[in-house]
């Protein structure tokens, strides 16, 4: 979450497999841990949000950045298939959820114009 000019850790979660229900996926657990603090929120993880569940879930949320540093669950292929990103050769991938849409920026941060001011997620 935003705290002046730097990000402040509010929550952490860890899952080793995706066999549990989507509600317990790491990004969802982390998001729950934010409570009702004001955003924007930054979630850093070594896998893409699963496309069918978590991606759809965060599309209904606002002012969230998910920084994807690796494709350890191989969910990235869904995003390539849907033509949201062109490939998985360059990570991290920054996904900005804002106003019902997701904006993808590969390699470097690239928030949509209307996204609220926030510290750069590049060094986190
Ligand atoms: Zn998920």
Image: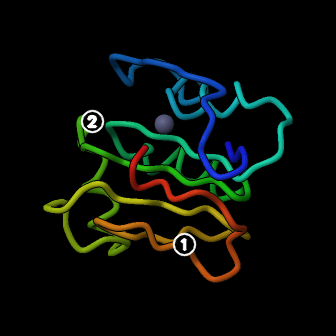
Toward the viewer: 24 or 1?
1
Toward the viewer: 53 or 11?
11
Distance Cα–Cα, label 1 vs label 2: 25 Å
Q: Which residue is mark 2?
A: 73
Where is residue 79? Give x, y as percent: 34, 62
Position of the C terminus, as image quadrant, is top left
Number of residues whose C-alpha sits closer than 10 Å to that of mark 1, classed few (under 14), some (14–19) or many (20 or more): many
82 lies above or below 40: below
In the picture, measured across the screen, residue 54 lies left or right of residue 67, that is: right
* Residue under the image location 28 percent in, 65 percent down: 107
Toward the viewer: 120 or 63?
120
SS category of the residue bearing label 2? loop
28 lies above or below 53: above
Where is residue 16? Give x, y as percent: 33, 16
SS category of the residue bearing label 1? loop
Q: Which residue is mark 1?
A: 111
114 lies above or below 120: below
Where is residue 75? Give x, y as percent: 31, 46
Position of the N terminus, as image quadrant, is top right
Number of residues whose C-alpha sits closer than 10 Å to that of mark 2, classed few (under 14), some (14–19) or many (20 or more): some
* Residue under the image location 69 percent in, 67 percent down: 117
Earlier-in-chain disc, 1 versus 2: 2
Nearer the observer, disc 1 or disc 2? 1
* Residue under the image location 42 percent in, 60 percent down: 94
Scheme of image coloration: rainbow
**Quadrant of the rendered image containing residue 105:** bottom left
Residue 33, disc: none
């Amino acid at each position: 979450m935003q705290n002046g000019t730097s990000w402040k850790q509010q929550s952490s979660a860890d899952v080793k497999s995706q066999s549990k229900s989507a509600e317990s996926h790491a990004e969802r657990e982390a998001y729950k841990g934010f409570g009702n603090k004001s955003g924007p929120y930054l979630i850093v993880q070594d896998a893409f949000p699963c496309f069918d569940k978590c991606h759809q879930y965060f599309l209904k949320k606002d002012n969230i950045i998910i920084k994807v540093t690796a494709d350890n669950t191989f969910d990235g292929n869904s995003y390539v298939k849907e033509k949201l990103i062109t490939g998985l050769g360059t990570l991290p991938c920054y996904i900005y959820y804002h106003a019902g849409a997701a904006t993808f920026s590969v390699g470097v941060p690239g928030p949509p114009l209307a996204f609220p001011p926030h510290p750069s997620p590049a060094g986190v």
